[in-house]
Structure formats: C-alpha cells, structure tokens
C-alpha cells in the first residue's frame, strides 16, 4: 500500500493512517444486497442482512476509534493491552447501549399498535 501511495504521489501516511484506512475499508456495506432483497417476500433474510450490516459498521467504527487513540511510535506490551482494553470497552458499551435500545424498541413495538407488521415503521422507530 505504501508503494502505491508513493507511485500516485499522494503523500506519506503514517502506520496509524494505514490501519485506520484498513478499518474503514473492512466495513462491508450491505446496502446493495438489501436493494436486491424484497422485505415482503423474505423478511427474515432481510432482517439478518440488515443486522449483519449494522454490526459490521459498528465494529469498524469501534476499531477505527481504537486505532486512532493508539500511539505506534512507542509500541510496548502495555500499549497493546491498552489498545485491546480500549477496543473491548468501546465494543462493550456500544453493545450494552444497543441491547438496551433494542429491548425498549421491541417493547414499544409489541405494546403499541402503530409499529406492528411494518418494517418501515420499525426502522423509523430505531
């Protein structure tokens, strides 16, 4: 990758920049797949693909933020443990927040009539 950037005369990037770009590129977006699927014909598959896309994007965001906070100029075992701790902290708090919002949304959709049997309303509520 570094040689490609040198040939294109883009400029020099640090190792943190390359890792950040890798974290961004690793997020596979499932929007094209969702456009092909019909949510009325295959609601379970549509929900699974949508959920997988959300998890991929969230993991990439957490990994990108953890990499940006990491100092690669002085790599030690404590800094690597700090990176892992930062990643798992962000991942854990994001997961807990997502579960809480999901449970509250599921309760609202279950108890209130306006959200039933409409994936558009469910996504709008989220």
Image (cartoon, rainbow, N blue to C red):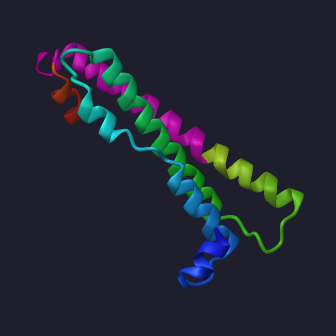
Q: Position of residue 45 (x, y in %)?
A: 35, 19
Residue lying at 87% horizontally and 63% vertically, measured from the top left: 76
| Rendered image quadrant of residue 70 | bottom right
Residue lying at 16% horizontally and 15% vertically, measured from the top left: 117
Extent of the magenta region: 90-117
Q: Position of residue 38 (x, y in %)?
A: 21, 23
**Residue 42: in sight, yes or no?**
yes
Is 94 magenta? The answer is yes
Question: Of 60 and 85, which appears nearest the observer?
Answer: 60
Q: Position of residue 122 (x, y in %)?
A: 22, 27
Is 102 magenta? The answer is yes
| Rendered image quadrant of residue 48 | top left
Left or right of 106, for residue 20: right
Q: Main secondary structure of the magenta part?
A: helix
Question: Of 31 and 124, which appears nearest the observer?
Answer: 31
Figure check: 9 above or below 46 = below
Residue lying at 20% horizontally and 24% vertically, measured from the top left: 119
- Residue placed farthest to the right in the image? 77
Residue lying at 85% horizontally and 58% vertically, measured from the top left: 78
Figure check: 18 above or below 66 = below
Left or right of 23, for residue 47: left
| Rendered image quadrant of residue 17 | bottom right
Q: Position of residue 16 (x, y in %)?
A: 66, 68
């Amino acid at each position: 990758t570094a040689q490609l950037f040198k040939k294109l005369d883009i400029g020099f990037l640090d190792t943190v920049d390359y890792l950040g770009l890798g974290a961004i590129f690793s997020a596979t977006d499932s929007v094209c797949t969702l456009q092909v699927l019909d949510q009325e014909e295959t609601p379970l598959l549509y929900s699974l693909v949508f959920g997988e896309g959300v998890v991929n994007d969230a993991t990439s965001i957490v990994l990108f933020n953890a990499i940006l906070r990491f100092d690669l100029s002085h790599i030690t075992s404590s800094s690597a443990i700090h990176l892992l701790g930062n990643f798992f902290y962000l991942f854990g708090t994001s997961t807990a927040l997502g579960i809480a919002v999901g449970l509250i949304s599921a309760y609202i959709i279950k108890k209130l009539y306006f959200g039933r049997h409409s994936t558009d309303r469910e996504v709008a509520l989220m």
